[in-house]
Image: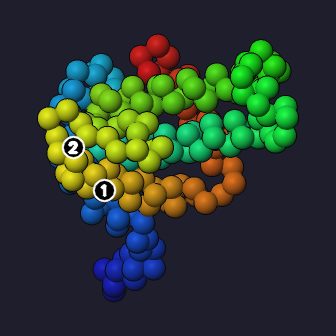
Amino acid sequence: MKSAQEALRAASTYDPNKQTIVDKLPEIEAGLTGEQYNLPLKERQHLTEMGGGDFNKGSAMRVIELRNRLEVTNNEKKRFKSAWLGRGALASIKNVFGGLMMSKKDRDHRDTVERILSDTERELGQLYVDISHHELDGTTYTHPGGDEERDNRKRETLYVASRAYSEIAGGTQPDKWESALASWRNEKEEWGAES
């Protein structure tokens, strides 16, 4: 009786997005650089815990999480820039003089977005082979020594997994930027200079 109840509970809580991530993990693991072994012990232990005792699986899960953060932050950067520039004659002047015309609040926001992008790209670079801004702005990027078709397949695999992660994490909600910002700040507090 108990096993039937467990089976029913498992069936009723089945989430296709979670299954997508599970299905994509082996492919993402294959794209890990090996540089993740150079991370500090505390971070390696954290990744091992994240992967349920499997360091590479934890690293792949972290890559999915970071790739989602990168996308959310890049979207915030675009949103902020278009909202700040606005329209009309002032837009071209603002575009030329940039930060000189920004309020302190706007400069702080812009700088925070840039720090998150930089931190996220750096950490992704330690974990995964071919992450770059190019995949976000639509231009083609081939990792040195790689072939374009393989790199595009890897990029697509990671994109699908990070979209599934976004759905699980409530990524369709309008406050996803706030969530990414809070997550980054929490990590900064927890890890300090190591992050």
Which residue position is annotated with label 2? 31
Q: Residues within 10 Å of mark 2 (few under 14, many from 20)?
A: some
Which residue position is annotated with label 1? 157
Q: Nearer the viewer, residue 182 or 121?
A: 121
Residue 156 placement: quadrant: bottom left
Instruction: Identify the mark nearer the N-term, 2 or 1.
Output: 2
> In which quadrant is the C terminus drawn?
top left
Residue 108 placement: quadrant: top right
Name which residue lies at 63% across and 25% down.
112
The kind of secondary structure element at disc 2 is loop
The kind of secondary structure element at disc 1 is helix
Name which residue lies at 57% across and 39% down.
73
- Circle 2: residue type: Gly
Q: Nearer the viewer, residue 180 or 8?
A: 180
Q: Is residue 38 left or right of residue 125?
A: left
**Residue 94: x, y in percent?**
78, 26
Question: Which mark, by number, is residue 177?
Answer: none
**Residue 132: x, y in percent?**
38, 35
Asked if labels 1 and 2 touch by Cβ distance under 8 angstroms, the answer is yes
Name which residue lies at 42% across and 66% down.
17
